[in-house]
Image (cartoon, coloured by chain):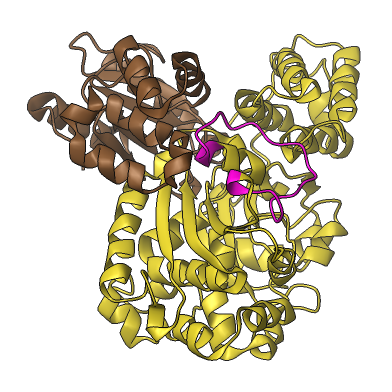
Chain colours: A brown, B yellow
Amino acid sequence: MLAEKYPEEVKKILAKYPPEQKRSAVMPLLYLAQRDEGFINKAALEDVAQMLDITSTDVAGIVGFYTLFHDEKAGKYRMQVCTDLPCALRGADKFLEELCGHLGVKVGETTSDGMITIEAVMCLAGCDKAPIFQLQSGEGIETHENMTMDKTMELVAALRKSGKELK
Amino acid sequence: MAALLLRHREIPNIGKMDVYKKNGGFGAFKKAVTTMKPQEVTEVVKASGLRGRGGAGFPTGVKWSFIPNNIWPHYVVANADESEPGTFKDREIMENNPFQFLEGAAIAAYAVGANAAYVYLRGEFWTVAASLDEKIADMEKAGFLGDKLFGSDYSLRIHTHLGAGAYICGEETALLESIEGKRGLPRIRPPFPAVYGLYGKPTVINNVETLTNVPLIVEKGADWYKSLGTADSAGVKIFSLSGHVNKPGNYELPFGTTYRELIYQYGGGVTEGRPVKAIMSAGASSAMIVADDKALDTPMDYASVRTLGADLGSASVIVINDSVDLDWVINKTIHFFKHESCGKCTPCREGTYWMLHLIERIEHGEATKENVELLNLVARQMQNKCLCPLGEFSTMAVTTAIERFPADFIPSRAGGSHG
């Protein structure tokens, strides 16, 4: 249960919104529910729904609508490469293809050690810094800009070695 | 001229409270709260000619003046959802000059009598939100947020709210739905947010860059601000330059700078020294501009860009050289909008789906002439039929690329060039 596991965080989240509008807390609470496993399990859906007096179907609708909420397990890190137009004009498609080759996976797949899932995503608001990707884990999201394949593989090695926590 | 918005490029550490204060920070907020009536603040912003920098270009002070005084409470929401391919200005402001943006939000809140403001950031701005939370705490500590500010009766709190990956939430009513803890589906308007906004209360929604201009206007006055820029486009603007240029990035320039100056003087020219083929003036939702001499010498202001059959919008300039074909380009833009369509309006939900099927067939060289005509027809049928601009946005590049670059859509040509 989130309220018992993260009492301080839950209190802080609820305080942001008028008491009669606590449904507003659904998105921050879902990020919290996603923290441990990197995805939102069925029990967490029910838990969040109960805390906010809405149905678990409502909560599942939110999870399904927003791309940064996940209802299935993936690698510890989701490496989300932008391949939208401005990045693609600077070689993002080729970058993604090479990255997949280096890791021996296709887009959407997870490396055999369960560490990294490769995803192609929409614009990350860093068009001048392509190739660009973000790393999402349960802990949060961080952006990596102006990436080369060498820098990326160094990062992958570091992640594999340390299971590095995100900022 | 000294930078007015991207001040961190000239003043190191302006993102720190002491440095920001030393450079006049929060003087405008104090001036507003202690010496001006809320209505006077709105009047100054109205007189300055400041227009919304998120893309729509609506006069900011006019927007504030729509807030009625018989329904309470009021809210201010900063739109930091920056998600359109080609836009990356608000990220730079919030990462580097956050207090000027937050001060602008605070002044807006004072002007419309709001005691709470929300900053809605796209989920991808996770670290930006964390750093804004720290800056908001700094402001509380320094007495710029909280109760009885500057000894007045005015109180204000600012909160961040993180989205979770949905371009549609940049549309203001979808954004409000999202803060309310719902899926980001646009509302039917009227009523407009100024009357029925967040939690059904009067709400002002402004873009990050727009708000970042506000402290300058309150401090230096409407006439000073108006003296920058051109007749219909007051002030300065951040132009986000991306695509086939040697030095992509944000450039803060007066309105009226030409595309040629932006691309060659500031952007270091086109990659591989190739000619510019097309310009998208306002991100992926832009019409496709043929980059001839007339276009390159067009001043970037609201009225002049319109003469090219395009819009200045958020001034996110995507440069495309002659190494790629436009069918590949619009495959990219259609793919984006198809992914981001919220599904509420049938023309957008179905139209983007069918446009994607058609453009993939065209790009793979499997299309007939009728397929190109059908793509154009589907796009045109979507126009003016959706609740929010997303549906319309998805068609702009399609119809204009087919019209202005017909050679790139001849079905028989052998395999197009890709990026």
Name the quarter where the N terminus of chain B is drawn: bottom right
* Horizontal side, residue A65 vs residue B408: left or right: left
Residue B310 in the image: above or below residue B340:
below
The residue that appears at 76% across and 78% down in the rendered structure is B230
Residue A157 in the image: above or below residue B171:
above
* Horizontal side, residue B366 vs residue A94: left or right: right
Q: Quadrant of residue B321?
A: top right
Give the image location of residue B17, x and y in percent: 29, 75
**Numbered circles on residues, count:** 0
* Horizontal side, residue B3 vs residue B9: left or right: right
Nearest the eye: A1 or B252: A1
Residues shaded magenta: B178-199
Task: Report the magenta stretch's main SS.
Answer: loop
Nearest the eye: B20 or B272: B20
Nearest the eye: B258 or B264: B258
Q: Residue farthest to the left?
A: A162
The residue that appears at 34% across and 10% down in the rendered structure is A42
Give the image location of residue B239, x and y in percent: 60, 62
The residue that appears at 28% across and 31% down in the rendered structure is A32
Q: Quadrant of residue B19?
A: bottom left
